[in-house]
Image (spheres, grey):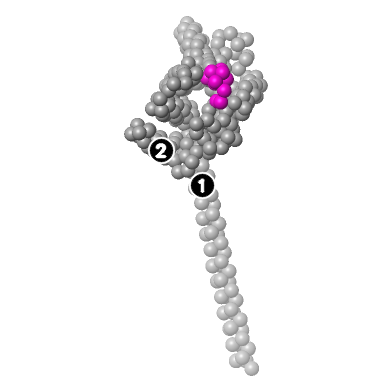
């Protein structure tokens, strides 16, 4: 009984304090990502297109995932009370989560092609192909999780898969395509990118003087490649840190799902672990903007320029309004002075006419 009360209190405090903080910082960070990756200088970079759409889906993931938790701190959770809310949250939550994970995976593959010394592979990094891949990824992961709409429902006051056989399939499916394959592919291609950049570095050292004269644009591209590589590396590290507990829980849940003789205390602990591992998943999309800002000099520079442009436009607007107000005051004073002069003139004329009479 004491354990039950303790776990409930901890969960309520996380929902009441921690989830709103994640929601505020995460949604605002994704919003800044969307604005910055929409800028002209990033618009024609295929890798940034993946980051842009990944940021959009991350924002939806945070809203779908954290808003019900924050809501349940004050009221009964709708996802554990209403069947339709359970189904929709499960479907859209998995769909958008898979979309941003596989878009980040595509970004790693895109950077590998861009850093390659093979001309044919470098031609694959173009905006046309990136747009097509983004569309395919979105459509694919809007279709594959459709089973959640049928098999998800409320069981024992918790939104869960109803059928045992399908629960095993769902756990393995989510574990493989959501927790195992994306980070594995990203790690492999980051290793390939690192090897490509080392090969380019050796090539530049052999042809240093020619390179300094003829390839200044390539040097700039190489700097950008290193920054993107660092961004991808740090993201993979955060991804693994926040996803591994969830992967372990999914594997454990798949292996122990058919065990019927489980004590109430074990059920409470399992439910609480599931809750904690789910909350950890939302840390990755929450920190995406701050990872970009800390690891990329170009991203920091563009963010500063964006903030300064907003402040400059605001100050400029205030200056313009101030100038217009000054002009209006001057015009008003001049009009008053002219009217006073006209009144004095009329008075003088009337006095002269009166005296002459």
Front residue of 144/195: it is 144
Alpha carbon distance from label 1 to label 2: 42 Å
Front residue of 221/333: it is 221
How far from the left and from the top, in percent, is residue 253? 47, 20
Q: Main secondary structure of the magenta part?
A: helix
User: Which residue, given by chain and number where applicable, does mark 2 sit on?
Assistant: 12
User: Which residue, given by chain and number where applicable, does mark 1 sit on?
Assistant: 314
Question: Image height check: is 207 above or below 277?
Answer: above
Query: Which residue sits at x=56%, y=66%?
Result: 332
Q: Which residues are magenta?
A: 161-171
How far from the left and from the top, in percent, is residue 353? 63, 88
Residue 261 within the segment the image draws in magenta: no
Mark 1 surroundings within 10 Å by alpha-carbon count, few (fewer than 14), some (14 through 19), many (20 or more)? few
How far from the left and from the top, in percent, is residue 342? 60, 76
Query: Which residue sits at x=36%, y=36%?
Result: 5
- Image quadrant for the N terminus? top left
Mark 2 surroundings within 10 Å by alpha-carbon count, few (fewer than 14), some (14 through 19), many (20 or more)? some
Secondary element type, mark 2? helix
Sequence-wise, which precedes: disc 1 or disc 2?
Answer: 2
Q: Is residue 97 left or right of residue 136?
A: left
Front residue of 250/34: it is 250
Q: Are marks 1 and 2 in contact (CB under 8 Å)?
A: no
- Image quadrant for the C terminus? bottom right
């Amino acid at each position: 009984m004491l354990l039950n009360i303790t776990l409930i209190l901890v969960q309520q405090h996380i929902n009441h304090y921690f989830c709103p903080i994640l929601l505020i910082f995460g949604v605002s960070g994704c919003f800044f990502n969307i604005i910055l990756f929409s800028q002209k200088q990033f618009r024609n970079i295929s890798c940034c297109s993946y980051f842009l759409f990944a940021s959009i889906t991350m924002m939806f993931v945070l809203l779908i995932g954290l808003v019900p938790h924050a809501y349940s701190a004050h009221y009964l959770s709708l996802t554990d009370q209403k069947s339709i809310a359970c189904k929709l949250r499960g479907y859209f939550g998995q769909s958008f989560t898979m979309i941003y994970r596989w878009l980040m995976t595509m970004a790693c593959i895109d950077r590998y092609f861009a850093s390659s010394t093979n001309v044919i592979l470098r031609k694959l990094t173009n905006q046309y192909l990136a747009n097509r891949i983004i569309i395919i990824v979105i459509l694919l992961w809007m279709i594959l999780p459709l089973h959640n709409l049928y098999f998800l429902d409320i069981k024992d006051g918790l939104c869960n898969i109803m059928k045992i056989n399908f629960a095993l399939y769902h756990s393995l499916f989510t574990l493989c395509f959501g927790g195992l394959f994306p980070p594995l592919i990203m790690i492999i291609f980051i290793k390939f990118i690192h090897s490509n950049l080392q090969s380019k570095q050796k090539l530049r050292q052999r042809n240093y003087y020619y390179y300094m004269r003829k390839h200044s644009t390539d040097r700039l591209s190489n700097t950008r490649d290193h920054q993107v590589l660092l961004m991808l590396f740090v993201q993979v590290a955060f991804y693994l840190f926040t996803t591994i507990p969830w992967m372990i829980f999914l594997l454990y849940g798949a292996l122990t799902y058919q065990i019927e003789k489980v004590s109430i205390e074990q059920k409470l602990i399992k439910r609480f672990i599931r809750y904690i591992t789910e909350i950890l998943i939302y840390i990755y999309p929450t920190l995406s903007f701050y990872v970009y800002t800390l690891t990329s000099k170009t991203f920091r520079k563009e963010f500063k320029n964006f903030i300064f442009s907003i402040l400059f436009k605001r100050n400029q607007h205030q200056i313009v309004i101030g100038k217009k107000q000054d002009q209006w005051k001057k015009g008003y004073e001049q009009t008053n002075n002219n009217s006073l002069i006209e009144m004095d003139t009329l008075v003088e004329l009337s006095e002269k006419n009166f005296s002459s009479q």
